[in-house]
Image: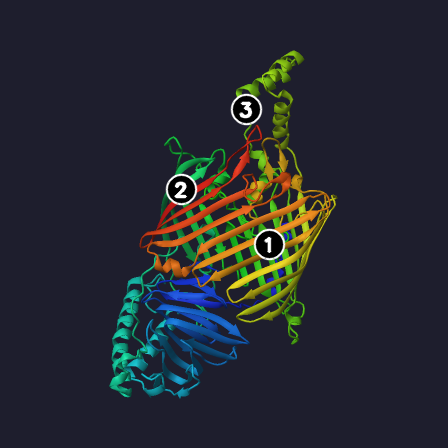
Amino acid sequence: MRLNLFLITGLLSFLIFSKAEAFFVQVDTGEVKVIRDGQQNLITDTGSIFYGDLVKLDKEFRATVTIENSSRMLLQGPLDISVSDDSSVFKVDLAQGQVLLDRNQPYELDSIVLVSKEFVFTPLGTLASVKIAQSGYPTTAVVNGSVKMVSPDGEEIIVEEGKFGSVGPEGDLFSGDLAQRAIESLQNWADEASEVVQKTENEDETGKPQENEIQGNKQENLENDNSEAAESNEIAVDKKSDDASNVTKSVETPSDPKKEEAPEEKTPDEEEQPGESKKSTGSTAMAPQSPKWEIGAGVVTVNNEQWTRLAIGVDVPIWKFGVFFDLEFFIDSEGKFSNKGWDFKDEPLEAITRKIRYIRFGHEEDPLFIKFGGLSSVSFGYGFILDRFTNMLHYPDQKLLGLQFYLNDISPLGISLQTMIADFKDFKDDGGLLGARLAVTPLKMTDIPIINRISIGGTYVKDLNQYAPARKWKLDLAEDERILVELRDGGFLKDSLKEHLESKGIDVDEKLDNIDEANNAKTMENDFGLIGGDIGIPIISTKFLGVDLYGQAALRDDSKHGWGIGAPGVALKVWRLWGNVEYRKTKGRFTPGYFDTYYLDERINRKPQVYVKEDLIPDEELNGVYGRMGFNISNVLIIDGAYQYLVGDKETKDQRFEATSSVGDLVLQKVPKLNKAEIYYYKSNIGVNDEKFFEKSEFRYIGYRIGFEITQGASLIWDSRYGYKRNDEGKLESNNFVSVLTAITF
C-alpha cells in the first residue's frame, strides 16, 4: 500500500509541471567523457551535463549541447572544457579544442562567456567559433553577429560578422577578414549538427534510416571541413604579417592529435544510457541509436568460492529507455558448469530476472528518472536515515532487483520525490526494504535572495522484515550437530551423555540453542523503520564558494524509544575542497545513517548466534560530531573521508571512520592503459569492547578497484573487497569478494 501511495503521489506531482535544469548533450560522432565529482562517465548517444562538469572529446569526435531552448554549443575534439555559472552567466573554460556557439532568441541566460588562456570571448547573439590548441593563442571566427574579445591585459576589440579575431606576436589583439570557405565550413558544421537530431530523409519503406549513407555523409562533411579550414588558416595568417606565422590562428583545423583513450569500464549502475532527446529548434526527434554489445569473462566470488563467469550482454536503447539484457554462465570451483541463473524449475523468478541487468528511463537528475535493477549510492536528504545505500555489494553473484523512481524539481514549489525499493524478491520472503523522500522549496517563486532557495524534506525508510534473508538459510548441520539434535528430539540426550560431551570441550546447550535460533529465524518477523525531516538553507552559491546551513532529525516508527538530531550543520565547498560538519545527538536505541552502504550485509547475522543490526544499537544518550571532507588535488589525487564520534555517560561510543582515495583524471591520461585506480577503508563500532581503528572485525571493510585498458574497446577491472564474519565458535574468518572481469564492447 505504501509503495502504491508513493507512486500515485509521484505521478500526480509530475502532471503539475516539469522543468529540466540540465544541459542536454547529443553525440554527433564518437563519445563524450563527462567528469563529475571525480567520477568519469561516458555519453554515447544522449545525456546531460551540469554546472561544474568537465567535458572531454577525443580527436574528430563531435557533440552538441543545448544551453537554451533555441541556442546550442557545438563541440569539436580533441577538446577539454568545463562549464560553470555566475549570476545567470553561462561560462565555458576552454583548455583545448573548438566550440561553435549558435545562439538565437529568445535568450534565457543573461550572458554567455568563453574563456581560454585568460582571453575572454563574449558572443553577442551570434554564430561564432572559438578555438584553442594545446600550444598557441585562442582565436575566434564570426559568421553572424559579433564577439567581444578581451585580452588578459584588458585590451578589447569587437570582432564583427565575417571577421576573425586573434593574437599577434606581441600579444596584441587584431581582426581580419574571414575566408569565405571558412564561413561556409562553420555554417555546414551547424547545419550538420541540426540534421543529426532530425529524422533523415533517406529512409527505406520500413522507416528505418539507411545507416551506411548517413555515416558516409558525416565522414565526407568532416573531411570537407578540415580541408576548407586549412585554407582559411593560411588566409588568416596572411592578413596580419609573415611574422605572425608562429601564432595559432586556425579557426577550423583540428589541433594536434591527443592520445586515444579507451572508454572506462563501468559497473552496471554507471552505464550511460539514452536520456532526454536534444531540444532543437524545429525538431525533437532522436538520432538513430544502435544496440551496443558486451562480451565478458572473469573470476568472481560466489558463496565464498572463486568461480569463472562468462557473459554476453546487449544494451538496447529505446527512445528514452535503456535496457541491458544479460546472458551469463558460471563455472564452479570444480570446473563444472553451474545452473546458477538457469534453474527455471525451482527458482523461475531468479532465472528470469538475472537475464536483465537493468532498465532505466532518463537520468538521475532529469525531471523523471526510473531505474530497475542494480542501485548504487542512494541517499535521501543529508543521509541521516538513508546514506549511500547500494544493493550491489555482491554483484554479479547476487543480482538484486531494486527500483528508483524520482521526480525532480517539478511545479512552482520545486517539488522533488524520491522513492526506493532495495529488492523486489524480498517481498516473497515476507520482507522488503523501501523508502521515500518528499521535498519542497516553498518560497521558490519569490524574489527574496537565499529565502527562495530554502528546501524542506521528509523521509521515511522501513525494512518490513529484518529476518527475511533467513528464509533462504540452508541448515546444513555438521555430523556432531545432527546427532545431538536427533538424540534430543528422541529423548535420548541424558545428563550423563551431556557431561561426557562437555568434558571433551563441547558446549551441548550452546550448540543446540544456536541450531534452534537459526531454525526459528526462518519463520520470525520483525520490522524496523525510521521517519525524519531535514531543512537546507543555501547561504552562498557561486562557482568557487558554496555555503549551506542545514539541520536534520529522525525517530523510530515503533514502540521502542529512539531518536536523533543532526543540527546545526554546515556544508562548505571551496573550489576543489568540500566538506560538512554537524553536531549530533541521539537518545534511546537510535543511530544515524542506519541504512548505509553495508546494510544488506549487516541487517542479520547467523553465527555464532542469530541477531539483527537493530540489536547492536545501544540504549543510551550520545552526543558528538560528524564531519566529512574531500579534496581534489589538481585532478591528480582525489581523497574523501568521514568520521563520527558520539559518546555517552557510560562510556558507550558510536564511532565510525571511512576514507576513499582515487587517482585523478590527469594521471589516468598520462599513464598508459590505466583507466581506474582507487582504494577505500570503512570501520564502524570503533571503541566497542575496546576495538581499535584498524583492528580486524566484522565491521571493517577494505578494498580497491583497478582498471586497465587491454585494447581499444576492451578493459580489465580488478575489484576486491576484504571483510570478516564470525564462525560457529565466534572466531573471525574471511568474508571476501573478489572480481576480475574482462569486458569487450562493440
Q: Is residue 465 visible?
A: no
Alpha carbon separation for disc pair 1 and 2: 30 Å
Q: What secondary structure is marked by label 1?
A: strand
Image spot of residue 701 (x, y percent) = 52, 44
Q: Classify 10 Å Cα crowding around label 3: few (below 14), some (14-19), many (20 and above).
A: few
Pick whichever of labels 2 and 3 is earlier in the sequence.
2
Q: Is residue 586 visible?
A: yes
Residue 617: x and y in percent read: 67, 42
Q: Which mark is residue 328?
A: 2
Residue 574 horizontal/vertical position (percent): 54, 66
Q: Quadrant of the C terminus?
A: bottom left
| Amino acid under disc 3 | Leu
Q: What's the CA distance linking mark 2 and mark 3?
A: 32 Å
Q: Amino acid at mark 1?
A: Thr
Q: Is residue 105 left or right of residue 337?
A: right
Residue named by callout 3: 477
Disc on res. 419: 1
